[in-house]
Amino acid sequence: MPSFIKRSRWLLGALLLVLMLPNPAAAKPLNIPVVYYKLPNGLKVVISEDHLAPVVTVAVYYNVGFRVEPKGRTGFAHLFEHMMFQGSANVKKFEHAKFVEANGGSLNGHTDFDYTNYFETLPSDRVETALWLESDRMRSLDVSAENLKNQQNVVSEEIRVNVLNQPYALFEWIDLWQNAFTNWANSHNGYGDLVDVNAATLEDVRSFFKTYYAPNNAVLTIVGDVDTEAVKKMVEKHFGSIPAQPAPKMPDLTEPPQTKEKKLSQTDKLANLPALAIGYHVPEQNSPDFVPMALLAQILQGDESSRLYQRLVKEKELSIDLYGGMNYFGNEFDYSGPMVMTIRTTYKVGHTGEEVLKEVDAVAADLAQKGVTEKELADAKVRYRSNIYNQLESSFGKAHLLSVLALFRDDPKQVNALLEPFEKVTAAQVKAAAQKYLVASNRTVIDRVPAPKGEK
Amino acid sequence: MHKNHSRNPLGVFLVLLLISAHAVLAQQKTPPPPGPPRPLNLPKITEKKLPNGLTVVLAPLPNVPKITTQLLFLVGQAADSDKHSGIAQVAATVANEGTETRTSKQIKEELRSMGANLDLFTDTDASSMFGSTLSEFAPRYFELMSDVAQHASFPETEVALAKDNLIQSIRAQRSQPSFLAGERLQKAIFGKHPYGFVVPDEKSITALTRADLKDFVSRYYVPNNAVLIVVGDFQPDAAFAQIEKAFGSWKSRELPKAEMPQPPTRDRRQIYFVNRPGSIQSEIYIGNLSIPRKDPDYFAIRTANTIFGGSFYSRLTRNIREEKGYTYSPFSSSNTIARAGFFMTGAAVRNEVTGPTLLEMFYELDRMRVLPVTDEELNAAKIFSTGNYSVELASQAGLAGRIATIYMYGLPHDFIENFRPKIEALTPADIQRVAAKYFDTYRAAVVVVGDYEKVKDQVAPFGDITLFDAEGNIVSQPRGGGGSSN
């Protein structure tokens, strides 16, 4: 997550500068080639050629994330992701990694709120190897009790190393979500409780696979130095005969509107400095408020010129860092459901969370009353465009955007028009978003302070 | 081999039945062969020098309409640390917080207006200004970079704030096991050598003044000590003209002479335990002094590292993760830098398996030393290295970073083209030779960060323990001294 922005006194200079700047809307439009189609079994396929480097990314995105986990199985979507590396009909345990690396590539998988992805980037002459590997596990995942136990141990260690043995224990995600949301699908701990992770059975794994890991619940994306027609044939050969499954029933993610501020304090036995996390509910992605809100987030905390960074770190000297954004794990496009904008800051010993919160409120009040300047908004749009290019620079980054646009919007070609709604946002819309969403009744605040020495 | 590839054919069969026996028949049983090789498209890199001594390296890579830059000064984080510990780090932090004509806030706002970043970091051999911008703003961006490089003003308020924040953030880092382990290992291997410097103490930070910082950059942030690397979407001639305009008036200055001592050697294995009461895992690092980057064995030790623990399908991961389930995050890395280097391996494991993990790590290290790797392993590691190299060179930051190593570590200019043939020429004997020398379990530094009371009995069988607290103070030493200097 980036740490970010701000402005104020240099109004005249700023206006003059605007006149000299190229109009961001006039910047070279994106022109990413996108071929999009569906196999008869429902698999969505995205191909985007790019011959600058001899590299290809193959990615499979499944329409399943933390939010579908049943009660008593927190962390299961992620445990399942690990099981996808434990072998399939023709690929033995962990040999997925062997085949990718021995072909010059790298690989990973990631579980998120609303998707789980698997991807490999490798020299482009090896593209069919990656397609074969992905098809083999989509078709014929093979799991054993021994491998499940092994991965339950591995995932338990992952939770220890990233959460339980860390200062702050990811409270700005796990604890904030547990309190900001009331619907269990949204609020539960997606990394998982160790008890739940270790309670999972082989039957759970098999049924999850059958329900969610079908071709009609997935996107296959190929980006890079390949020939589209040749790749289409490979896709048909390896994925064409994988049978579709009944569409899975998705959980109700409806979240009742929050009407009152929620505030908690916690102590931390491992931390040396206090920290504050704030989550504001954001508008739904198809709401007209959404894009103005995304630019507001940019102006609020998008970089070191941002309002909050300048206020908390530079002017008031309360915080030593600031990070967060519209989507704690990703961007505006790679989730599908209720979301909170996260603000997370480590502040100095000798100060209180209330002092930090007071400054956040002052920034919010200023935005609600005076809004943003034209220059500030224009610059935030430039910053946003630049950030999108950062994502599009790597073949994986490009594959990611194309995949989530196919998964959640059924239209990866939108990638070339991604910036258009952002360019149209007005200062009045950003001000209105601040008035509506940056209010105490819409937020959850957690103040986490080091436990007194004796408790360590 | 600690492989775990035995499978129950019946189990496989049952699962297949669950899915669809018919569909499985259509599935190919073995991996498809590679297609015809694709052209490598190595970037065209040109080097020029300005009259003031600034080296300019241009490498077009027009994957997005941005450019990525690195302005590196050949001055490491331990420079001048005998007089002013931490001065290079603080100078780098404050350099872009104000110039003679721009406030900190103006710099940050200007960067935003170009979709740009400009941040300074220090490492063992350089202080670097990393940045990127939308290509359309390149001339303004070079002008701003040049202003920061030449005219950083170190305003009193910014210096005070940066010092305070550095002290606080080091305190915060001391709550993280990976920071504590890395710091202790680097100190154990390099002792008082400049490469043993990680972060300054609070007293040294407090003592730094604005005048010290200005003096430091006036001596080291000079064009004849700098290399400007530009990668991305630009026209080389136009970019060079913009750079000449922005940096041409920068004055060169004679450089201070720096003496670099030899790093210490170690005659026996020693354990450095950093106590972190309440830990539910032990963070284990094992390391040894190795070679500078320009040593011809760079390619062999890099590849030995890939096979041992530097890739996902490595021996270490297969053993302590995929077979034994001790850990999520085993790894190893070969860190070769300008004057020396070190090889290290690490894992974070639950308290109960601290001893068993040490046993397996030593076993896997020794196996690399005693037995040759198989042809299959070596061949896979070669393709892994060359393939991932292509991926690295396809990103602006990856290519800029590779070019930077040529200047930081004194490598031949054909390093990028020659990487592939050098890797391809390696034999199993090369791998065993470097492993025998540098994966030296009997003279290794072993660091454990964890709850001493809970795991000390599991660690004690592996050697004499020197116990530290999280601040780096020695709590207890074995009789006869705690080994290498701190």
Image (cartoon, helix red, strand yellow):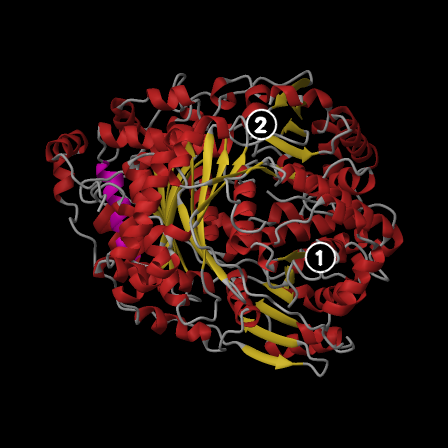
Q: Tell which of B208 and B241 is nearer to you.
A: B208
Coordinates of residue B88 in the picture (x, y in percent): 70, 58
Image position of B399 (left or right of B236): left
Q: Is residue A134 magenta?
A: yes
**Residue located at (61% from left, 49% from top):** A420
Are the residues under badges 1 and 2 in a single subunit?
no
Q: Secondary structure at mark 1?
A: helix
The 10 Å Cα crowd at callout 1, few under 14, some 14 to 19, many 20 or more, is many
**Residue located at (55% from left, 30% from top):** A170
The chain that hosts pointer 2 is: A
Q: Amino acid at mark 1?
A: Ala
* Pointer 1 residue: B92
Vertical placement of B377 versus B446: above or below? below
Coordinates of residue B417 in the picture (x, y in percent): 42, 75
For residue A171, the mark is 2
Image position of B283 (left or right of A385): left
Q: Secondary structure at mark 2?
A: loop
Quadrant for residue A404, please give it: top left
In the image, which residues are magenta? A127-141
Q: Tell which of B347 and B422 is nearer to you.
A: B347
